[in-house]
Image: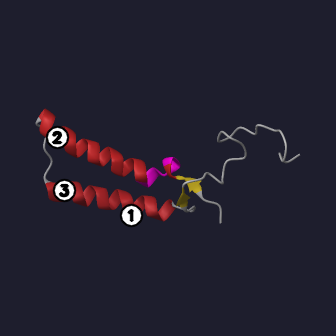
Amino acid sequence: MNQKAWWRSKTLWVNVVAGAALLAQSQFGFVIDGEVQAAILTVVNLALRLITNEPVGLKDETAPGPFPGIDAGGPGASQ
């Protein structure tokens, strides 16, 4: 099965945003209870897990060329 690059993972970015929001709470004074945050993040991660269909790796094996959605052509490009 093809793997997608780690930076294309929705789950990763949701958790990065959640971590940033956790840090921002203390700066801006808008604090959400920790149990509520954990519950929201759990539901979002479970939903993302249900729609996940590719493993994550260091290389992007799903893109046809050097850029996702762009076929660069050149040697070895499919005709």
The three-letter amino acid code for the residue at tag 3 is Val
Q: Which residue is drawn at 65% across and 39% down?
A: 67
Residue 25's disc is 2
Q: Which residue is drawn at 33% across and 60% down?
A: 43
Specify the segment rendered in magenta.
Answer: 7-11
Residue 36's disc is 3
The reply to whether the C-beta atoms of the residues labelled 1 and 3 are less than 8 Å apart is no
- In-front residue for pair 28/50: 28
Check disc 1: other Cα within 10 Å, few if <14, some if 14-19, many if 20+: few
Q: Which residue is drawn at 89% across and 46% down?
A: 79
Which mark's residue is nearer the viewer, 2 or 3?
2
The three-letter amino acid code for the residue at tag 1 is Leu
**Residue 46, how many percent across, how many down?**
39, 63
The tag earlier along the polypeptide, 2 or 3, is 2
- In-front residue for pair 49/76: 76
**Residue 8 colored magenta?**
yes
- Magenta region, mostly helix, strand or loop? helix
Residue 14 drawn above or below residue 45:
above
Image side of residue 71 versus residue 27, left or right: right
For label 1, the residue is 46
**Residue 36, how many percent across, how many down?**
19, 56
The tag earlier along the polypeptide, 2 or 1, is 2
Number of marks in the image? Answer: 3
The reply to whether the C-beta atoms of the residues labelled 2 and 3 are less than 8 Å apart is no
The three-letter amino acid code for the residue at tag 2 is Gln
How far is mark 2 from mark 1, CA to CA? Answer: 24 Å
Q: What element carries label 1?
A: helix
